[in-house]
Image (cartoon, rainbow, N blue to C red):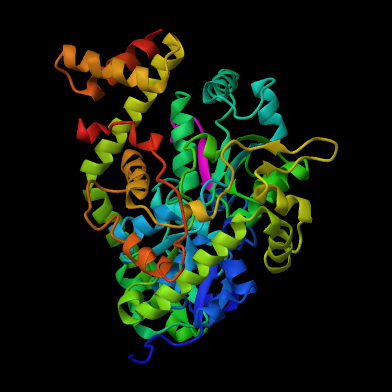
Amino acid sequence: MPAPTIERPLRVGYVPLTDAAPLLLADALGLFARHGVPVVLSAEAGWAALRDKLAFGALHAAHLLGPLAIALAAGAGGLRRRLTITTGLARNGNTIVLSPALAAAIGPFAPPLDPRRFAEALHARAEEGLPPPTLAVVFPFSSHNYLLRHWLAAGGLDPDHDVRLVVVPPPRVARALTEGAIEGFCAGEPWGSQAVVTGAGRFVLATGDIWRDHPEKVLAFGESIAERDEEAVLSVTAAVIEAAAWLEDPANRPSAARILQERAFSELPLSTITAALEGRVAAAPGFSPQPIAAPMRFLAASRPRREEAAAWFSAMRRWGHAAAADAEALAPWRPDLWDRAAARFSPRPVTGRASPSPLLQMPLESDA
Amino acid sequence: MQAGLEAAGFQVVAVSADTADLTRLVRESQADVIVCDLDDPSRDALESMRVLNRDEPRPVVVFASRGEPDQIEAALEAGVAAYVVEGLAPARVRPVLEVAIRRFRAFQALRNELDEARATLAERTLIERAKGVLMQRRRLSEGEAYRLMRRWAMDRSQRLVEVARQLLSEHDAK
């Protein structure tokens, strides 16, 4: 066997979010070591920093937004890199939260909020001469941006006209809402729960209510890493698959939450972190946690699916964030590598089916 | 860093410690270039200003504490951000910032040439707005409103965007 060509330990980046759990748990449970590949995890402040470190070699692999991998493959943000995605990390797991004032303007509702109700509130507000509300997503090329846009458009709102979309890194959304810099956000857990618990915001719906069981973050390796050191890529992938299977067992949730708190969210109460693992959004004191119809899942996301990623690319084209057809756009998704990593387990992990996307149902004018 | 930039002959028009209202600060300060650290959380907001081409995008120069020469070259090739490693030596700062501004302007010019994509975006906005008007007025779902507009377009042998434009002008006249 040739000597490994990538230096050890492998540096793997993540943004502090509950859906980084398969990476954090693989590390905490010693699974990287057991699969024979030393890994050092690195917490990153936001997606731009993580993307650049992955693109320029300071990280070997990372927890990544699916649409960001497409943007890099298609050169949509100016920078072109072909990453290798060997496994999905989670499905669902983001929440849309509004400030108490904006939520009150809608009138009484129970989650998930119908986007037409939200549109009515915004039309009424516009008639009073008020400016459109500022809503945050976590990055331009993110599932959050495209799912929120889909939901707004389903209510008859133009996301580039009727609201002002800005970007705030996930660990900062709750504070931005408290400070009034934004009036709502779509972000991954536990940050929505944190805003609800502190009274900064009200939960209105989960992104799984927009596209049931949508794929969320992926594990992506830097360009040419898979060609240079396939063994490292397969071993890291196998460790993450094993962690996802471990997370699937409800008996492991309390220790998973404690490990996440210790490693990524030391400033948050345990109940805020546990909520997403239990399929809920945490509640303000005195209220019951809200159940989520399509909760965060780990193993069900494990095998990366190009047909699902196609929905992100379609949304990017719909909103003018990517040019027309690009054969490279979905090339990073490598279910074949997942299959080889998963073959190390007996029986092979069961990860369920692909989830059909409503984002593919809206025909593009350019295709008409 | 401020002293380093001023020593290199630049005027520092604003310093922001936080992401809140960053876009307004950039606009009001009339900055030609934005300088920040690789790990600065404000970078995500700056990125959205650039990628989505709203709010007057600016070139961003990113300082990293480690990196390799070919990586920095690759970042420059991307035409939108400059990477500087090993801190701020005044002699190096000026050329790097000038290259970043020049490349950014070239990139923007190239972008403006892609007005086909731009026109498509403008047309898309008209269609989205017209669809919203129909949905509100006729209490239709998004799919129903879209199909109705498509049917009108087909019946009248018009492009969808023309139907949208008429619909909006009737709506605005009311």
- The residue depicted at 38 percent of the width and 24 percent of the height is B129
Residue A349 in sight: yes
Farthest residue in the left direction? B157
Please give the range of residues in magenta.
A157-166
Q: Position of residue A273 (x, y in %)?
A: 71, 54
Q: Position of residue B7 (x, y in %)?
A: 53, 80
- The residue depicted at 59 percent of the width and 77 percent of the height is B3
Taking the magenta stretch, the answer to whether it contains residue B49 is: no
Nearest the camera: A249 or B133? A249
- Above or below B170: residue A244: below
**Left/right of residue B50 with respect to residue A196 in the rendered view:** left
Quarter that holds the N terminus of chain B: bottom right
Farthest residue in the front direction? A347
- The residue depicted at 56 percent of the width and 30 percent of the height is A131
Quarter that holds the C terminus of chain B: top left
- Above or below A268: residue B55: above
- Above or below A354: residue B109: below
